[in-house]
Amino acid sequence: MKNDSTVLVGLDVHKDSIVAAYSVDLGEVQVLGNVGVRECDMDKLCMRMQSKGARVVWVYEAGPCGYGLYRYLTKKGFECTVCAPSRLARKPGDRVKTDRRDAVMLVRALRNDDLSRVHVPTVEDEALRDLVRAWSAAKQDLRQARQRLKSF
């Protein structure tokens, strides 16, 4: 390990799996494969990446899994970026989309600083957003129920 090396880690995150790829400085991107979704699995991955460089930078795509991973990694003291999946540059002929390819693409995009970063809301902001969405859904359900009753 070099004292001044930077490890770039790309994660393709899903509910049941996380596929990781990494690169040390400007070296070749290497795929680690499925690393697991539990906290102990992430702890092992964090220690493994820390052994490869002094600075570890993580990136993953925003998605339905939320920002829990971002908060977990930043709480541990790592730099983490959440990027917009719709803004990632893809080749026109590149139609095959696999978890491994996505993880490698994230590392390369992070290395080239070609990411569109997403603002990560605080826990309170997320809770308020969920409350507003639930209120809106309840209001819409009430309106639909009224319309059903009036149609009799």
Image: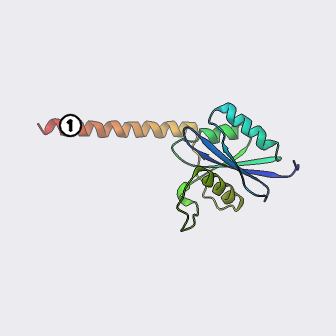
Residue at the farthest left position: 152
Q: Where is residue 16 in the image (x, y as percent from the top left)?
A: 56, 37
Quadrant hosting residue 137: top left
Q: Is residue 97 above or below residue 54?
A: below
Give whichever of 152, 39 is nearer the camera.
Answer: 39
Q: In this view, does 71 lie above or below 60?
A: above
> Which quarter of the rendered picture does the C terminus lie within?
top left
Q: Where is residue 12 in the image (x, y as percent from the top left)?
A: 60, 47
Residue at screen point 72% across, 34% down: 43
Residue at screen point 83% across, 52% down: 5
Q: Is residue 31 above or below residue 144?
A: below
Residue at screen point 58% across, 41% down: 67
Residue at the farthest bottom position: 92
Q: Where is residue 107 in the image (x, y as percent from the top left)?
A: 68, 55
How crowded pointer 1 is (Cα within 10 Å; few <14, some 14-19, many 20+) is rated as few
In the image, what residue type sits under mark 1? Arg
Residue at screen point 73% across, 55% down: 29
Quadrant hosting residue 78: top right
Circle 1: element type:
helix
Q: Name the residue under label 1.
A: 146
- Left/right placement of residue 19 relative to residue 54 reads left
Q: Position of residue 134 (x, y in %)?
A: 40, 36
Figure label count: 1
Quadrant hosting residue 92: bottom right
